[in-house]
Structures are given as C-alpha cells and as structure tokens.
Amino acid sequence: MKATVLEIGVGKQFARLQQAASQAKPGDTLLIREGVYPGGDYIEKLQGTEQNYIVIRAAQGEQVIFRGGSQAFHLTDPAYLKIEGLIFEQQTSNGVNIDDGGSYDTPAHHIVISNCEWRSMNATGNNDELKMSGVDSFTITRCRFVNGSPGGSLIDMVGCHYGIFSDNYFENGGSNCIQAKGGTAHILITRNRFINGGERAVNIGGSTGLQFFRPLETKYEAAFIRVVSNIFIGSNAPIAFVGAVQCEVANNTIHRPVRWAVRILQETVGNGFLPCGNNSFHDNIIVFSSAQPAFNIGGNTAPETFSYGWNLWYNPDNVSWAGPNIPADDKDPARIIADPLFIDTMNFIPSSLSPAIGSGSPEIADYSDFNGRQFSTIAAMGRNRARGAVELYSTQSLSDNSLQSSILYPNPTSGEVFCALSHGIIMPYVTLTHSVNGNSFLLPVLWRENGISFHCMSIPAGTYFVQSGQNVLGKIVLIR
C-alpha cells in the first residue's frame, strides 16, 4: 500500500486534522502546515500497523499551534500512531485526550509522542494537559509541559501500561506533573526535569473510581512504576506513593521540596485493596530544608515494608539536622548526611569531592543517568555508582576544543537561535554560560526537523557557551 502525505492547512487538501484523519491509511503522514488551529477535533480508530505507523506532524520549520477549545483533539482507540512537533495551549478541559473508548479489553496502543509542547491550560479544575485512559505500549519523549490547571495534572494516566516518559521538561504543574492511577503498571519515568511540580510532582497512584480500573479486578492504583535519574526542584512533595506496590524511586536528585520529600498514602481502602507497600526508595540525593518531616505517612499504609537505602540527605539551613524520619526502623544504614557538593544547582553535576560519587549501592544500575550516560561505567572501574541523578565523568572544560559537531545560527544574533545537530539526543532545554563571568541561563527548546531552536531575547549581550547536559554544542554571540 502506497503511503500518502495528507496536507492540512489554509488552501490545502484538508482544513482540519479530523478531516484528514478520516482518510488516513497505514503509513500515511498527516502533515500540518504553519498556523493556529482551533481545538475540538474528535478522531476515532486512527490506526496504522506495526510496520506502517500513521504520523501526525508539523511541517519542517513551521509552528503549528492548537489553541483553545475544550480539547485540542480527542483520539479514541488509536494504534501505531506518532505525533510530532505540535504545540497545544489554552484548552478548557484536557489539552489532548487519548483513550480506549471504554473498551477495556482492547486498549489504545503503540503511541509515540515526541517534540511537542503543552504551554498553558485555560482551566482551573481537575483538567489535564495530556489525559490517557487505557493506553498501552507508549512513549512520551522530548516534550515540554508547563503551566497546568491548578486542580489537574500535566499528564494523567488511568489504567495505562508499558509506557516510557523520557527526556521531558515539566514546570508549574497543578496537582501533579505525572499521575499514574487506576491500575497503571510497568511505567518508566526517566531523565526528566521537574520544576515546581505542584502538590505531588510524580504521584505514583492516586484515587480512581473502581469502575475505571484497567483491568477492573486490579487491587492497586499503581504497580511496577520506576522513577529513575530525574531532577526535581521544588513542589510540595516531589514523590508520592499512593496505593502503590512494587514501585521503585532511585538515583533522583531532589532539591528543596517545599514540605516533604516523600509521601506514603492510601486513598482507596477495602474490597481487598492492597495497602501502599513493598516499594523502594534508594540512591537518591535529597537537599531538604523544610520544617516538615522528610516523610509524610498516612493511615492504612505499610511503610515498614518499603526498602530504603543508599540515600544522601543534606539540610543546608540546619547544620545540626539529625536526618530524615525514615519510617519504622532505620533501614538505611548506608545513608549519608552531608553536602553533595554540586558544581551548580541547575544541572546538579557533582564535583569530584562529592560524597555522592562512588558511594551508591553496589548493584550496577540497568538505567542511565540524567545525561544518558551509564552508571555502570564507574562501577566497572571498581567503584559503586553515584547517588543522585548525575554520574561523575571527567569534567568537560568550556573551551573550543570541547565543541561538538553542531552549527549555531544566526551568529551573532539578538533573538532566536537555531542549532543543527549531528549527534545524540538533546535534552528539552539548553544552558547558556557566559564565557567571562560564568552566569548561566536555562532555556527551553523547540524541536525542528534537523535540530532545535531557542529564544535569547531576555539574555544579556555577550559570548556564551551552549550546553545540553554535559555536552557543549557551540559558542554564540548575543548582541543588543
């Protein structure tokens, strides 16, 4: 079957996404041209095949915005679908809604969303930027989620399974940045940055009507969720286990939560529902300065069944701090209470003198650090892995010799910068570091067909090194 490009836009074959989707076949690309599109499209059974995904994407170098409406679009029973390079804003219900149409035995499946941006809701209640119900085998990567509804989540999952959230940027969540409930299981959340993530930046569990669980007989809100190698800055509680079992939170860097570092709660009880327990919290760095206890424990939970170990704690505002209130017996004999000695509090790279280096648990991690490098590299040299999200490698000097094969243009510039990449996966933001005074600025990126762009209008004039993680992409001159 021959693949077709179906163009959407003013003067094109189709005016709206919904119209093009009704004609799409496996292997087709729904190519959206630059413009602002109203929300409200409903698309049912948009299904490719394992060999021929259907692709919805913005045209190369063009900005496509879905603005307003109750929802940008609602996908029911999609399968083998990719969504790339779109922007969503000002929806009044859910930004994008993907579900199984209520047919719990036939989930939506094989969905890949990349390089998209959700940048503000026009809602105040329990509304989500990305709502997924009954979605299996999915990947959300290199996306930005900012300014959620005060009562909702940036991403909300109900009964979803076998998914990955990697290399995304979250800021100003409402209640949550990511919530996994209703029997959600086998989810990996890794290498994401969470800034001011709301009440619970990652809510492992939650509260769902039993009729919405997938499968219906499930006796937990969440299970087998792995939260590894992420950076958390702020939020009332970066991590919450709520009716969760067999979940792991490891090698994260948690910086100055507002109230608690971790909450252990139970919101659904009775009917054989399992208490929150048998989870693990290990190899994390927590810089904690709240007057609250580090752990907040609710009723009907089993905190004594958790595994706690190899964490590093530091309270910069109280040098005599005795440490966290680890639930039940002290099950973290390897814990360290000391300054982690970060090089900076933006990328949280540990210095060579950091007590986090080489002091983590002896098992070699089966996941990479925040910058995509393996913890096992250090372990192979006879040292344990690091604690926290970032493993120490030889520190790159900011010099012309360390520049990667990237092209930054225009250069000099006073506004938007484009970067053509010929290597690796870039993070959802870049760091600009002044070549003289060392001042740094964190800027979100927009993804293009062959690279990225970022806006520098608010940055003072000067010469800057541009970094993604620990990789130096180039040098740019800003003029005013």
Image (cartoon, helix red, strand yellow):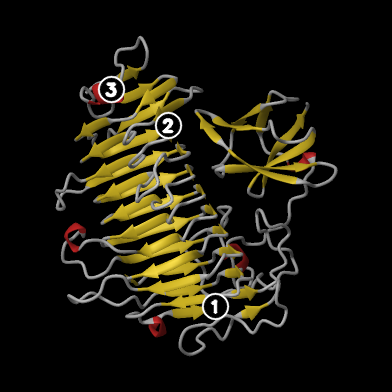
Instruction: Look at 77% across and 35% down and name the residue there.
Output: 460
Q: Identify which amino acid the numbered label 3 is placed on.
A: Ala
Name the element at disc 2: loop
Front label number (2 vs 3): 2
- As measured in the structure, the alpha-carbon distance from the residue carrying label 2 to the one carrying label 3 is 22 Å
User: Among all residues in the image, which is located at the extreme bottom?
Assistant: 329
Q: How many marks?
A: 3
Quarter of the image where one finds residue 112: top left
Quadrant of residue 46 within the rendered picture = top left
Task: Relative to 155, say whether 217 is above or below.
Answer: below
Seen at 64% across and 79% down, the residue is: 336
| Element under disc 1 | loop
Q: Is residue 353 left or right of residue 445?
A: right
Q: Tell us which disc is closer to us: 3 or 1.
A: 1
Viewer-side residue, 50 vs 108:
108
**Amino acid, disc 2:** Leu
> Marks 3/1: CA distance?
58 Å
Question: Which residue position is annotated with label 3?
Answer: 3
Left or right: residue 135 compared with residue 163: left
Q: Which residue is mark 1?
A: 293
Find residue 153 and report its horizontal and vertical position in percent.
40, 52
List x then y, in percent, for residue 346. 66, 53
**Mark 1 Cα within 10 Å, few/some/many (few <14, many 20+)?**
some
**In the image, residue 123 above or below residue 134:** above
Point out which mark residue 86 bears: 2
Mark 2 or mark 3: which comes first in sequence? 3
Q: Quadrant of the C terminus?
A: top right
* Residue at image location 22% in from the left, 26% down from the top: 25
> Gap in Å between the C-alphas at discs 1 and 2?
41 Å
